[in-house]
Image: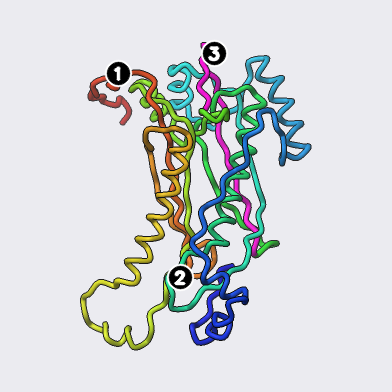
């Protein structure tokens, strides 16, 4: 996953335009793939045990029982905002991360790894949405995206999406424009505040970029000993990688007809590829206005009674 080679080792392959190495090196940065059109009612990718759990949850929802990972405060604020929790929904995908070489002294996006990481998260998110759809949910709040690794698969990673499915108490449709249940990683407090201020989430939007940061040659390292100076190559590499991730996140938001993104974060991880191969993952909440009133209550000072 993300193996490196020095320039002098790569030249013979790169000189041949038909070689795989040249194809990877000369390929333009890949745009993250998008999911296929959403099929309401689909259970594709959900195993038999998961389908049995969904059927059990349907019976529990009908009887008024629910499961949630919301805290007590979040649970009460979500209910106060007009939503009822239906159940804890999840999606999972164990994904094999492919192979790609990178030149030792070149800044470049690792397109194969970028697409793998995006597609795996999209599979997990879609399966979580399918579970929520089966429960008749309007959306999912408190979404968490995690990556797990196991000793029995060095090149395997499990991508997990978990959240609480909710439905509007008055029957108002709050789904995303594409027909999917909306997703949001906002806390219950932030979700309630957003609704009271005249906005609602339409979807968790994300973009990523796996980038190889070039190594510095020995001669350049010697020239910089004892000096304070910017490292332009490193600066440009990290700047470009973050920009690509953020741009792709913004494209997703526009596809959902969102007017903006709140709660955006940029997470940087190496995932075991080595210190010079980093994934920049941008995620946030696409929102749309639901009223012309965009004001919240004046903040008040509250004194806790606990010691």
Between 129 and 157, the one lying in front of the other is 129
Residues tagged 1 and 2 counted as in contact (Cβ below 8 A): no
Sooner in the amino-acid sequence: mark 2 or mark 3: 3
> Could you tell me which quadrant the N terminus lies in?
bottom right
Residue in the image at 30% along x and 25% along y: 305
**Which span is picked out in magenta?**
155-176
Q: In the rendered image, which residue does mark 3 sit on?
A: 171
**Around disc 1, counting alpha carbons within 10 Å, would you say few (fewer than 14), some (14 to 19), or many (20 or more)?**
few
Q: What's the CA distance linking mark 2 and mark 3?
A: 50 Å
Residue 307 locus on image (x, y percent): 31, 31
Vertical comparison of 274 with 255: above or below: below
**Residue 198 falls in image quadrant:** top left
Q: Secondary structure at mark 1?
A: loop
Residues tagged 2 and 3 counted as in contact (Cβ below 8 A): no
Between 150 and 305, the one lying in front of the other is 150
Between 35 and 266, the one lying in front of the other is 35
Q: Secondary structure at mark 3?
A: loop
Q: In the rendered image, which residue does mark 1 sit on?
A: 293
Report the residue that reaches farthest toward the top.
170
**Around disc 2, counting alpha carbons within 10 Å, would you say few (fewer than 14), some (14 to 19), or many (20 or more)?**
some
Q: In the rendered image, which residue does mark 2 sit on?
A: 276
**Around disc 3, counting alpha carbons within 10 Å, would you say few (fewer than 14), some (14 to 19), or many (20 or more)?**
few
Residue 69 locus on image (x, y percent): 54, 32
């Amino acid at each position: 996953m993300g193996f490196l080679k020095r320039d002098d080792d790569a030249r013979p392959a790169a000189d041949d335009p038909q070689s795989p190495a040249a194809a990877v090196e000369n390929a333009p940065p890949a745009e993250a793939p998008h999911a296929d059109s959403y099929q309401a009612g689909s259970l594709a990718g959900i195993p038999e045990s998961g389908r049995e759990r969904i059927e059990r949850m349907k019976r529990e929802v009908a009887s008024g029982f629910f499961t949630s990972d919301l805290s007590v405060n979040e649970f009460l604020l979500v209910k106060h905002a007009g939503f009822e929790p239906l159940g804890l929904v999840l999606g999972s995908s164990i994904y094999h991360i492919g192979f790609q070489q990178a030149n030792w002294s070149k800044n470049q996006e690792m397109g194969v790894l970028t697409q793998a990481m995006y597609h795996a998260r999209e599979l997990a998110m879609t399966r979580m949405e399918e579970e929520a759809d089966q429960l008749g949910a309007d959306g999912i709040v408190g979404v968490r995206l995690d990556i797990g690794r196991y000793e029995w698969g060095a090149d395997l990673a499990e991508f997990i999406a978990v959240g609480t499915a909710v439905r509007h108490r008055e029957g108002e449709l709050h789904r995303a424009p594409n027909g999917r249940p909306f997703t949001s990683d906002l806390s219950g407090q932030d979700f309630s505040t957003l609704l009271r201020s005249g906005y609602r989430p339409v979807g968790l939007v994300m973009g990523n970029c796996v980038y190889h940061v070039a190594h510095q040659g020995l001669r350049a390292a010697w020239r910089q000993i004892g000096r304070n100076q910017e490292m332009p190559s490193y600066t440009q590499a990290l700047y470009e990688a973050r920009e690509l991730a953020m741009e792709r996140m913004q494209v997703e938001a526009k596809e959902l007809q969102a007017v903006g993104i709140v709660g955006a974060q940029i997470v940087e991880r190496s995932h075991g590829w080595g210190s010079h191969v980093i994934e920049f993952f941008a995620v946030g909440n696409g929102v749309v206005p639901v009223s012309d009133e965009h004001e919240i209550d004046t903040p008040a000072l509250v004194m806790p009674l606990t010691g």
